[in-house]
Image: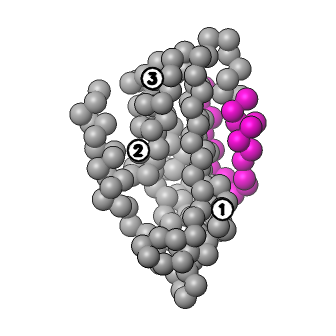
């Protein structure tokens, strides 16, 4: 069963890694952690505010995990996404996958992140030194996600 969480609380990378690698058939664990950085679009960023639609967001993340499972032989999938107010260097998202082989683990982790960035219903508002702004999806994120349509 996949672990899908949307929460305000932080997560501990070591704990999540340990859970992914417990099964004796696991030969590869790949993780990704996204963090709040201090710049974007040429401006200094002082934090983020993330909103979501409860229920719909978790369902969307579960669907992304299911699509990854349909493409690759995976043991475990974990997706944790934080919401609320986050500061510089805070962890935003954790994606972790385990599989018998590294190719499946690397590809599926990247696939999940690409789809998460473009298909999951999260709204991000950057806090700047002077004011704030809502962020739109980046064209580069869309391009990353659409390349998976060609790889099935």
State yes or no: discs 3 and 2 in contact (Cβ < 8 Å): no
Residue placed under numbered mark 2 in the picture: 115
Residue placed under numbered mark 1 in the picture: 89
State which tag comes first along the sequence, 3 or 1.
1
Crowding at dot 1, Cα within 10 Å, few <14 / some 14-19 / many 20+, comes out as few
State which tag comes first along the sequence, 3 or 2.
3
Residue 12 among those drawn in magenta: yes
Relative side of 34 to 15, left or right: left
Relative side of 147 to 4, left or right: left
Looking at the image, residue 129 lies above or below residue 141: below
Mark in front: 3 vs 2: 3
Q: Going 47% across and 18% down the picture, which residue do you hit?
A: 73
Q: Quadrant of residue 136?
A: bottom left
Looking at the image, residue 126 lies above or below residue 142: below
Q: Going 57% across and 52% down the picture, which residue do you hit?
A: 34
Residues rendered magenta in the picture: 1-18
Q: Going 34% across and 45% down the picture, which residue do you hit?
A: 145
Relative side of 105 to 7, left or right: left
């Amino acid at each position: 069963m996949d672990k899908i969480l949307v929460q305000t609380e932080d997560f501990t990378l070591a704990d999540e890694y340990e859970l992914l690698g417990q099964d004796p058939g696991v030969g590869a664990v790949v993780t990704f952690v996204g963090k709040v950085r201090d710049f974007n679009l040429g401006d200094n960023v002082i934090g983020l505010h993330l909103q979501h639609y409860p229920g719909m967001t978790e369902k969307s993340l579960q669907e992304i995990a299911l699509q990854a499972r349909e493409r690759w032989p995976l043991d475990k999938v974990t997706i944790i996404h934080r919401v609320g107010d986050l500061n510089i260097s805070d962890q935003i998202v954790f994606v972790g996958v385990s599989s018998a082989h590294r190719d499946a683990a690397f590809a599926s982790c990247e696939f999940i992140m690409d789809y998460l960035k473009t298909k999951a219903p999260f709204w991000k508002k950057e806090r700047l030194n002077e004011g704030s702004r809502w962020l739109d999806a980046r064209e580069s994120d869309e391009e990353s996600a659409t390349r998976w349509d060609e790889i099935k």
